[in-house]
Structures are given as C-alpha cells and as structure tokens.
Image: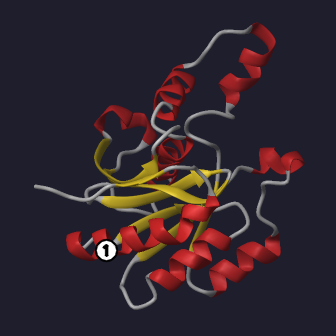
C-alpha cells in the first residue's frame, strides 16, 4: 500500500486547513466513524466540523484539563456551549500522559514516571503526535469512541492542527494495545 503523508516545514496553526483536508480524504477512504480533535478554545473543532459537515462522523473535541487555567489554555463555559450546540462532544479530563498525581510527587521528590517517558518518546515525532495519542486515550477512557475500530486523531503544537494519525485506540490501562497505523500529517521537525 502506498499513501501520501504531509510533512510541514514549520509546525503550528498555519497547517490546520491542509491537515484537516488530508484527514477528510483519509476518513472517507477508510470509512472511519470517530474523529478526535484537540482544541483549547474550540476554533480547531469548529474548523473540523465544517470540513466533515457532509460526512457522518462522531467528532470528539478534547480540551486541556482545568489545571491549566492559569496558562489561559482552558475552554470557557461559553466556548464549550457553542461546540455542544453544534453537536460536538466535548471532553475535559485528566491528561493520560502527564499533569496527574505523579506530577505532584515528581515536583517534590524528583524522578520520572512512565507516562513522562512515553510522552517524551512521542515528542520525538512532534508535539502533535503526543497530543494525538493522549486525546485518543482520554476519549476512549471516557467511552466517547469505539476502541474496536480505527479512529483518526488530530493534534498540534499549542494551537491549530499540524499532526494527524490513523490509530487503533485502547484504554489507558491497556496502553500497550494502542497501534499507530498511519501518519497522515506532521511537522518534518519536532
């Protein structure tokens, strides 16, 4: 099988439209039903909704945990309502690959958790690759996607989308069962 992978010279939100169009094509070819997209304030989720407006997909928008309120990365109640009114499922929960209980102990005592090791390995591909894997775990754990079917995950580097993958999901407790099947798009340099 031969498939095209998009490689972007620069990471970031300027790649969002091209990433979403490539995802649309692959979702259509594979008949994928679940699409999981990372979004802070909803812009990327709205763009994804518009791209898939004529397709029957379960669009799940995953936001950053409320623990990051201070950084300004968290979705407001109004932003959440806007997405939900458009039929987008919105998930905010603990991050699978960091920012959890082990983080508080690492800050005090040092060391590194297995979640951080996995996170750092995924960062070798791109920040978006880490985000894609993490949001799929989060959506699976919340019961918002089918873990028996391939899904597409869309992530990025702080805002917008520059990475997309086809992935066979798993629950966090079964992490070793996750399979990254295809890279649709990513920045050439992490």
Residue 155, horizontal then vertical, whole percent? 53, 55
User: For this rendering, which residue is in front, 156 or 152?
Assistant: 156
Furthest residue toward bottom:
54
Residue 23, horizontal then vertical, whole percent? 38, 68
Residue at the image position 61 percent from the left and 63 percent from the top: 14
The quarter of the displayed image where residue 74 is located: bottom right
Query: Considering only vertical position in the picture, is 102 above or below 20?
Result: above
Furthest residue toward right:
70
- Quadrant that contains the N terminus: bottom left
Secondary structure category for the residue under label 1:
helix
Query: Considering only vertical position in the picture, is 117 above or below 141?
Result: above
User: For this rendering, which residue is in front, 82 or 182?
Assistant: 182
Furthest residue toward front:
9
Instruction: Left or right? Give the position of 115 relative to 30.
Output: right
Residue at the image position 67 percent from the left and 72 percent from the top: 43
Judging from the image, the colouring scheme is secondary structure
User: For this rendering, which residue is in front, 76 or 171?
Assistant: 76
The quarter of the displayed image where residue 13 is located: bottom right
Pointer 1: what residue?
25
Query: Considering only vertical position in the picture, is 22 above or below 134?
Result: below
The quarter of the displayed image where residue 32 is located: bottom left
Mark 1: few, some, or many residues within 10 Å (few <14, many ≥20)?
few
User: For this rendering, which residue is in front, 67 or 124?
Assistant: 124
Residue at the image position 69 percent from the left and 34 percent from the top: 99
Residue 182, horizontal then vertical, whole percent? 28, 51
Instruction: Left or right? Give the position of 56 relative to 95.
Output: left
Instruction: Left or right? Give the position of 76 relative to 80.
Output: right
Residue 185, horizontal then vertical, whole percent? 40, 55
């Amino acid at each position: 099988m031969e498939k095209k992978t998009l490689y972007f010279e620069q990471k970031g939100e300027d790649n969002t439209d091209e990433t979403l169009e490539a995802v649309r094509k692959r979702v259509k070819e594979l008949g994928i039903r679940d699409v999981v997209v990372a979004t802070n304030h909803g812009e990327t989720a709205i763009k994804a909704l518009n791209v898939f407006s004529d397709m029957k997909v379960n669009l799940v928008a995953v936001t950053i945990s409320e623990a990051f309120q201070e950084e300004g990365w968290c979705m407001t109640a109004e932003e959440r309502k806007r997405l939900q009114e458009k039929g987008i499922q919105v998930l905010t929960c603990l991050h699978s690959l960091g920012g959890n209980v082990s983080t508080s102990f690492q800050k005090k005592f040092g060391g590194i958790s297995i979640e951080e090791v996995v996170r750092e390995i995924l960062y070798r591909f791109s920040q978006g690759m880490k985000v894609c894997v993490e949001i799929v775990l989060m959506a699976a754990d919340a019961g918002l996607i089918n873990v028996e079917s391939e899904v597409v995950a869309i992530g990025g580097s702080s805002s917008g989308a520059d990475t997309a993958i086809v992935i066979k999901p798993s629950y966090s407790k079964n992490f070793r069962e996750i399979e990254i099947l295809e890279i649709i798009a990513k920045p050439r340099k992490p």
